[in-house]
Image (spheres, rainbow, N blue to C red):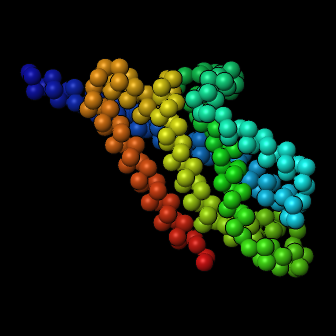
Amino acid sequence: MLSSAITQYLTTQGLQILVATGQTLQMVFLSVIFSYIFGLPLGIILVTTSPGHILENKTFNQILGAIINAARSLPFIILLVVIIPFTRFLVGSSIGTLAATVPLTVSAIPFVARMVETSLKEVEWGIIEAALAMGATPWQIISKVLLPESLSSLILGATITTITLIGYSAMAGFVGGGGIGDLAMRYGFYRYQLNILLACVVILIVMVQVIQMLGEKLASLVNKK
């Protein structure tokens, strides 16, 4: 009977960890997708409207840059609370995995914009100049020069973004966001179940290692240099 109870306890713990891991992966995956839907265009605009570039607009560039910097300066834990009304408006709740995706995405958008900006600025101006000389339009330069030439760097940037969001998702668990952070808080901290806390830490480390390895491998495969 004792062995049966222990087996049931371990099985329950295993299921809890499995569910929490799935919730974390869901939060991170959705956040990365949505943050790049909005952040990638912002990064492109930051580069192309900069002084001397194909769509130069110094005033607009400075205003957009200031807004992005202001958004990046807000700590995630504060953002998590500040945008609760917005989160409720979008998903109908401020608690749960889907709700946690909203602040994760909002916090990642300015980060992605700057990562994309950095990657696109690595493209040599001579390549852009050659495309201009051949009569390429701004859209053609963006789609056929800037993005393809910086693809490897963009992948590395996406890898860093994903790893950053894994850390943020753990913090989201502290306010009922679900996932590994929530499990570690409820059982590992409040109930002193150190085995669950340790398991959560190990899972987060493994996630980061796997994503970093896959990101570097993919970046090396598409690297044209």
Residue 3 on image: x %, y % = 10, 27
Q: State whether residue 163 is above or below residue 12.
A: below
Task: Name the residue nearer the viewer: 92 or 163.
Answer: 163
Image quadrant where one finds the N terminus: top left
| Residue that appears at 36% across and 39% down | 201
User: Horizontal placement of 172 versus 79: left or right?
Assistant: left
Q: State whether residue 1 is above or below residue 7.
A: above
User: Horizontal placement of 38 versus 175: left or right?
Assistant: right
Residue 205 on image: x %, y % = 38, 46
| Residue that appears at 22% across and 30% down | 10
Figure quadrant of residue 196:
top left
Q: State whether residue 20 is above or below residue 110.
A: above
Residue 28 on image: x %, y % = 53, 42
| Residue that appears at 91% across and 55% down | 57
| Residue that appears at 53% across and 71% down | 221
User: Horizontal placement of 104 versus 57: left or right?
Assistant: left
Residue 132 on image: x %, y % = 87, 75
Q: State whether residue 4 is above or below residue 30.
A: above
Image quadrant where one finds the C terminus: bottom right
Q: Is residue 151 visible?
A: yes
